[in-house]
Amino acid sequence: MGSVVNMDELSINHFDADWKAEIEALVSYNEKIKYTGEKNYEDYSYKTLRKYTLKYDKNSKKWLVDDAADAKADGSESSAWENKKELKQKNAPVLKWVRSGDKSNI
């Protein structure tokens, strides 16, 4: 998983005693699924243009995601952004879903 954040779209506002921020990012997900009885994995990787709304939590002193909205992306959107920051998740967790009889576990 990785993201490219459009820093030119960052806005921070203080209204009614709350701090909120809005930011836009091109987010990439790497997903593969292997079905029972199949030799190869199906690639379900995708990219999305996501607009986040963050709210500052005074108690934890952290910005928390308050809302997010997605739009289709082809992956080229960030090439037009002048002020951008690339974020990569190192050692991203690999989730394995295993089905045994009537039970499913992640």
Image (tube, rainbow, N blue to C red):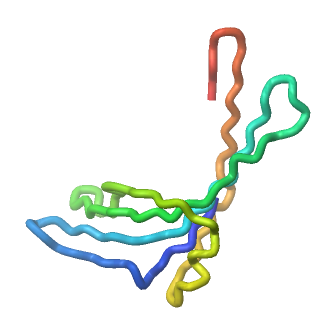
At a point 33% along the width and 63% down the height, the residue shown is 53
In the rendering, at what x and y percent does residue 62 appear? Answer: 33, 62
Image position of 97 (left or right of 82): right
At a point 42% along the width and 84% down the height, the residue shown is 8
At a point 69% along the width and 52% down the height, the residue shown is 45
Q: In which quarter of the image is the N terminus?
A: bottom right
Depth check: give the residue in front, 49 or 57. Answer: 49
At a point 70% along the width and 19% down the height, the residue shown is 99
Depth check: give the residue in front, 23 or 96. Answer: 23
Q: Hey, which residue is sitting farthest top in the picture? A: 101
In the rendering, at what x and y percent does residue 55 appear? Answer: 27, 62
Depth check: give the residue in front, 23 or 89. Answer: 23
- Work out whether 61 lies above or below 10: above
In the rendering, at what x and y percent does residue 6 appear? Answer: 48, 78
Image position of 86 (left or right of 37): left
Q: Hey, which residue is sitting farthest right in the picture? A: 39
In the rendering, at what x and y percent does residue 35 appear? Answer: 78, 29
Q: Hey, which residue is sitting farthest left in the picture? A: 16
The mark total stands at: 0
